[in-house]
Image (spheres, rainbow, N blue to C red):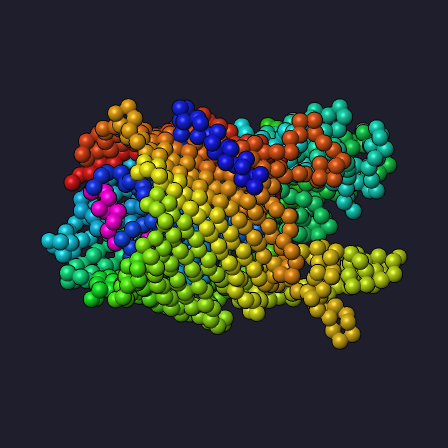
Amino acid sequence: MIGIRFACLRSLCCASLLALALPAMALQDSGNAGQEPAGGDEARATTLDAVTVTGTRIKRTEVAAALPVMVLQREEIDAQGITSAEQLLQFLNVASNSADSLAANSGIAPPDTRGNNGVSGANLRGQGSDATLVLLNGRRVATHGLAGQVVDLNSIPFAAIERVEVLRDGASAVYGTDAIGGVINFITRTEFQGLSVTAGADVTQEGGGDIYRASVFGGFGDLDSDRWNVWGALSVKENKILRGVDRDFANSFQPDRGLSPDTRGPPFATVFNQTGGIIIGSLVDPEDGESRTAVNLLDLPGGPGCEAGGDLMGPYDHQIWSSSGSKYACAWDYGRARVIQQPVESTQVIGRATFQMADEHRAYLEFMGSRVESRRQFEAQQFSSSTTVSASSLDPSTWYPLNSLTQDTYDMVYDGLAAYFGEDNLAYGNPIAYRWRCIACGPREIETTTKATRLLLGFEGVIGSWDYSAGLSRAVSRAESVLAGGYYFTPQLKQILGSGLLNPFLLAGQEQSAEALAALQAASASGVQLYGGESTSTIFDASFSGGLGFELPGGEVQAAVGVDLRREEYEFTGPEEAALGNAWVFGAPGDSQNYLPKVSRDVKAAFAEIYLPVFDSLEVTIAGRHDRYDGFGGTTNPKYSFKYQPADWLAFRGAYSTGFKVPSFAQLFRDSAETQYTNLDLADPATCPGGIYNPQVAGCDVQIQPDILIGGNPALEPEESKQKSFGVVIAPTANFNVSIDWWEIERLNTIRSGFDLDDMRADYDRYAANFIRDANGDILLIDQRFINTGGSLTRGIELDANLTGELWGGNYHLNLNGSYLDTYRKKDFNAEPYGDNLVGKYEPYLNLPLEWKHTLSFGWNKGAFTHTLTQVYRDGYEDYLPPGMRNGTYIPPAYDPDVEAYITYNYSLGWEVSDALTATFGIRNLLDTDPPFTLRYLDHGDGAAWESRVADPRGRSFTLQVEYDFW
């Protein structure tokens, strides 16, 4: 309750700033009982037409429904300068702060996140983009060909969108498996006559990250007189690249605040202590007698400093990273070197032909297609010396040798080490083990091309007193990723490094030889396919809705029934050589262990919904859906909702439902594999606490090397969920309304990837079932496959308030839309209690659970002009802690444990120049506010010093959109 009071206090404080400027998109809640629609009697009549609102199959003559549905009209979207579905999701408070955008998923991609190659996902209420249902005109589109379970928002034909409906409630009982977090329904026009051309640009003040777009929308035919209408829209869009070096806030060298790059692989190499290398034993620092294991000549006392090695270099902060052996190492700001917004080019087309077959019957054919090309770019390769070839290192054959080609450089390194540490622990002639960033290798790039289509044949009309709708559709998404630069075939690369042709010890301004660059070019793996995939859905659906012919005191009872028959297909393939891993192409994030030949499953579903107007003031809706998945049997999920309106100005609403989520194809069918544990440090954790082999300790003195079992698990079960909500809508006048909704989502028996072996052996009692033993009790296998276990509990409150009126001879609309997250808890095992509340605390990879978010908007229109001013607020949180601060060994002088709130303002001016011409000018991030500083520094993130799940890295930008209607 204290947190709620603080959140509300923040909102009230913001509302008191109305004189300064307020936010701009009126997020219209369909539950705003008593709200007077803009536009007088004509608009009011439109509102009262029978419509099907997202979340129900029954057409209603009122939209003050039991479920919280947010409706965003095209005019409101344009006023914000929003030009894509991804930007829209970033604006919505109900959307979670997760790595679903082109900025947040721009970091290094491990195999299990291959779907991030140019993909933008929708994630409502922190349930994941694979648990949020995305619809186009009320029907499914294909999930991404690589990601498998996630709809790519870049494939949505945004230019033709008329409105977007966001159901802020679980809807598995209505729509099926992937609607746990909610539903986003992109709705296009049903008919159009004329020709409209739109062009726009969103250009940043500091350069980089510009966005350009253009579209044409045309249609012919009148359904009333011609009995047909055909329209089509074509749009093109380009997101330009934005690099970390283009933004000052992306600076990792801020050690006083606790931030420093966690890498010792700079453009001028750091020498490492490896067996068989130039260093034997250990290097003892003459100043304090401590051992140094990573040394860069530039950072030794009396040296020129790390900055002499090249751009973005600086000293490695051994205190922050709790690594005293690296006191004289150098670091490189690879966060600043990264791309912080991926470049994407997209072409989208959508068309619809509608035929009025009879007065009460229509047929329509709809086609959607898109082509999206992304070029994901990372910093240049880092080469690390090791005694074996691993994912990030190369064996001794690649260490810097002593030969006629390398003599001068080798002697420079040896003499530099000997001058400070002495020669006792140096072996002249042994190769030099090092860690090095190969700038000459160029940035690593992965180019992904995705082609998505959907063809739909639909029928709708009225039979007697019942409405019907039926459709047959086929949706396909094909995607392929290829290496586009910065990657090299490992055998050739090892030969180049081992010969000494590439020199890792060059100062700033020095360049590799022409022979070295030619050898790199010859070893390039550019153009090599990384992987490809295809996702297909073939769907037949039919529904009927209407009155049942009898009444309750509140009116006629209505019902809806229907069926969904769906075939889902998925395949994921790639080159056979990818199974060689690092022995094939060095550092390529291949995913051969997840290859799947085409697999499919049939889904049969039947649903029913009944609307009971118990009294004039009380309505109850009961819905249920039975889904039968191949291999799982059936599951039935109900939903109960109500609306109680004791007065015209007051309404209460609530809902309870259950949900489920079936495993993905990869989680089920990925090939299981047994690989031997090759390390020499494992003992049986049943007899050896911690499972660390130690010949001197009884119970730990037997070394074991069992097989590790990884891959899909055909025994997986669907996840389960429970959703609850309760809200109140207050509308004391026609000009003011407010809605407050409490919600809770609990997910159980969640599907998780294999547990970390270190965790398993350290806490054996919890993981004992994963250690599979023979008849003698010896460990045969350690099972790290996907399993059902654990869960999550999330609770929050959502607020929407609207005030309209007349001001200065015009009309204004003031809107406050906020989201308060009260609870976010997780547990690893079903039988365990939930862990600590993570709200307001840093979370590394998935959803960042901010306590409070809001948009505060003020719109004013008079005559041909419309002004909109918007404040976007994202709460602060407890920051990430690097190891040195986590264990208490070091606290930087300017360290602050909290990340500040991120507050930006947007302004737009709309002008109806004529009946045919409209223009919208806007300034996004009006005050040019930098993202708040954070200690975040992750290998799989997008850089450092800022949080892309919260902030927009583009800074202030200027938008202009012009639309011209030819007729």
The residue shown at (21%, 56%) is 353
The residue shown at (57%, 51%) is 110
The residue shown at (38%, 47%) is 651
> Residue 412, located in which quarter of the rendered image?
top right
> Residue 299, located in which quarter of the rendered image?
top right
Residue 964 in the image, given as x and y percentages of width and height: 22, 36
Magenta run includes residue 936: no
Residue 142's place in the image compared with 301, above or below, is below
Q: Is residue 938 visible?
A: yes
Residue 500 in the image, given as x and y percentages of width and height: 67, 41
Residue 710 in the image, given as x and y percentages of width and height: 62, 63
Magenta-highlighted residues: 42-53
Q: In this image, 410 relative to 9: left or right?
A: right
The residue shown at (70%, 33%) is 317
**Which quadrant is the N terminus positioned in?**
top right
Task: Out of 50 and 146, give the one closest to the viewer.
Answer: 50
Residue 336's place in the image compared with 569, above or below, is above
Task: Out of 366 and 624, give the one closest to the viewer.
Answer: 624
Residue 899 in the image, given as x and y percentages of width and height: 59, 33
